[in-house]
Image: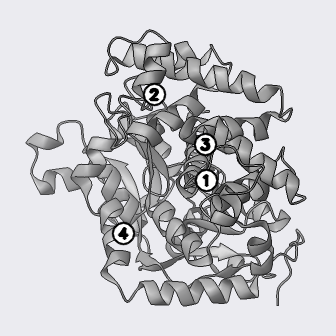
Amino acid sequence: MQKDENPQVPFDLSHIIKKDTLVALTGYNAYSYFVYQGKPMGYEYELLKRFAKKLDVELQIIVLKDINQMFEYLNKGKGDVIAFNLTVDKERAGKYYFTETLNYAKQVLIQRKPKNWQNLTKKEIEKQLIVNIEQLKGKTVVVTRGSVYSQTLKKISSEIKSKINIKLAKNTETTEDLIKQVSEGKIDFTIADENIANLLQAYYSDIDISLELTIPQRIAWAVRQTSDTLLTTLNNWLENEKNYTTFYAIYDKYYKNRNAFRRRFQSEYFSKNRRKISIFDNLIKKYAKLIDWDWKMIAALIYEESQFDPSAKSWVGAVGLMQLMPFVAEEYGVTDLEDPNQNIKAGVSYLKLLNEFWSRRIKDDEQRMKFVLASYNIGYGHILDARNLANKYGADPNVWDNSVEVFLLKKSNPEFYNDEVVKNGFALGKETVKFVREVLQRFNHYKNHFG
């Protein structure tokens, strides 16, 4: 077995189960993983969610633009799997394990059509395009770093016995960035997998992707060669997934629905454009200063509460973006619960009150935020009860994870809600534990894409 020059940590599936988190490394693009209208989406993201659910662990995603860096992170144990549109090449196949094939894709040349291409015949357009590999002689082709595209060009250069100038893009430049540069006339040529090229052509209609450079090649994910059990588990899961139409529907959703892609790609609520999470961003940023929290945390909470619908109403009577109960709204002088300005101001003010309450008890900022979120969802009385139970049974009352959250869950059991240290009785803590977890996960998605 060929050894990698960078040693790989001996972490396997047991390490993932122990830390209760699958850490996936993926790219920054419009198909693998992105945020659109406040919602995390993407081909790799949806599959990863399903696999993490199968393992019964949390999912953490780390976004990297540089493919080489993805493999460095994998070696060091900073990630467990590279879930990206990776072509299986001989060099890396000797250093890493690749999963079962997710799909196949040819590599194609991306070039710009003539300026007046709409008014030309097909033959007239082809006269001004490269239509065979021999015409690449002496041309400069810019390709992404860490991709297999430079190897493809070297092979073509050898076949045609002529030099092709291969230029590597900046570390931060993605395939999408290079295709955009071709469209804008900043570079003449690049290479992309056909499935990606088809998508981008829906937006950049002036690019030509007709020249195929390779036969269909395997696309897969990668894990360390120290992760035998993870590889086997992942492959078994993939084989099972392929028995169901959902697997193929997810692929079609992100790689074949060009109209949906075009709408997302030009939207100001698409994270690749790094513009907005919602139409309420400015209000959220304004009032986040009241509590000195990252505004994206408030946005994550609002999405979880109302999906940014100012007229949302819950079955218990909560209303608006931050799902305020009428008695809370009255406390902060709200006259119209569906008014975004009043609702967000009152909601953040209430968060501030809860934060001040817990700051006298929980000194760790990260843990305190979880207590605040839980209290926002179910009321601080039930969280105090859970702390009392944790203290009574020898757990840490100042730690949420695997401590206070566990005893909040137990408050639906008579043995615990009738305990003498419990002052607020029965509580269905399952929804609150889920609420805290999902707000924090969404916050991490927003941090990945919005800085």
C-beta proximity under 8 Å, tags 3 and 2: no
Disc 3 from disc 2: Cα separation: 13 Å
Name the amino acid type tagged 4: Tyr
> Which residue position holds label 3?
448
The residue that mark 2 highlights is: 275
At mark 3, the secondary structure is helix
- In primary-sequence order, the first of circles 3 and 2 is 2
Q: Answer with mark 3 or mark 1, whichever residue precedes in sequence.
A: 1
Q: Which residue is mark 4?
A: 251
Q: SS for tag 2? A: loop
The first of marks 1 and 4 along the sequence is 4
In-front residue for pair 287/46: 287
Instruction: Measure how far apart labels 1 and 4 are at the Cα level.
Output: 32 Å
- Looking at the rendered image, the disc whose residue lies closer to the viewer, 2 or 1, is 1
Compared with residue 131, is residue 302 higher up or lower down, i.e. above or below? Answer: above
Query: Could you tell me if the residues under marks 4 and 3 are in contact, i.e. CB atoms within 8 Å?
Result: no
**Label disc, if present, on residue 433 of the rendered structure:** 1
Label 4 or label 3, whichever lies nearer to me, is 3
